[in-house]
Amino acid sequence: MVQKKIIKVLKIISQNLKSQKIRWVLVGSASLALQGVKIEPKDIDILTNKEGAFKINELFKKYEFKPVEFGCLKIGGREMFKSYLGKFRIKGVKVEVMGNLKEKLGRKWNYLYKRLKSPRIINFEGMKLPVSPLEDQLKSYSRLGRKKDLIRVQKIKTAIAEKLNK
């Protein structure tokens, strides 16, 4: 179930980005919910490239909470992600924009650019929204190994199985 406030913010994002030449895709809980995963998103995560992150920062400057800058995210004391990250608050909803996101796999950094090249397009509430495929998000959440992510992994597997059985 996607809350009305999340839908309103998705409309603002969609309207502002559809005329721009920015490659972007929804990831995280909002993307999962739009694809039938039984999860209630509390925020919106956008994946783009470096240029897109800075352009989105310009477009949403009035909502800026933390400007786009390069940084690393540690999970369990280990560096797991690197990206150009910006944080925004639009109509009370937290929106994170990640440019050139890289995920650490063993000793190597894996650039998640493929998700920008071949997103699924979801028709939702009159919007055409690019979303990261469930299978790609399943792989990422499986690697994290956090308790909250293991719950998401199971919910994603259930949604994939339900789609296959239709």
Image (cartoon, rainbow, N blue to C red):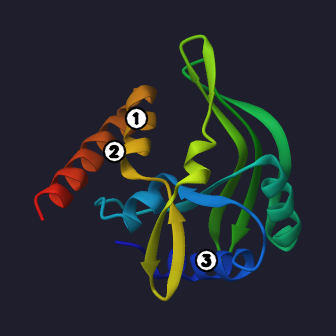
* Three-letter amino acid code at the position of disc 2: Arg
* Three-letter amino acid code at the position of disc 3: Val
- Residue at image position (79%, 57%) is 52
13 to 87, vertically: above or below: below
Q: Position of residue 95 (x, y in %)?
A: 65, 61
26 to 72, vertically: above or below: below
- Residue at image position (54%, 13%) is 106
Q: Which residue is mark 1?
A: 139
- Residue at image position (10%, 58%) is 165
Of 51 and 152, which appears nearest the observer? 51
User: Nearer the N terminus, badge 1 or badge 2?
Assistant: 1
Q: Which mark is residue 152?
A: 2
Mark 2 is surrounded, within 10 Å at the Cα level, by few (under 14), some (14 to 19) or many (20 or more) other residues, namely: many
Q: Position of residue 87 (x, y in %)?
A: 74, 55
Mark 3 falls on what kind of element? helix
Q: Which residue is mark 3?
A: 9
Mark 1 falls on what kind of element? helix
- Residue at image position (24%, 45%) is 157
Q: Residue furthest left?
A: 165
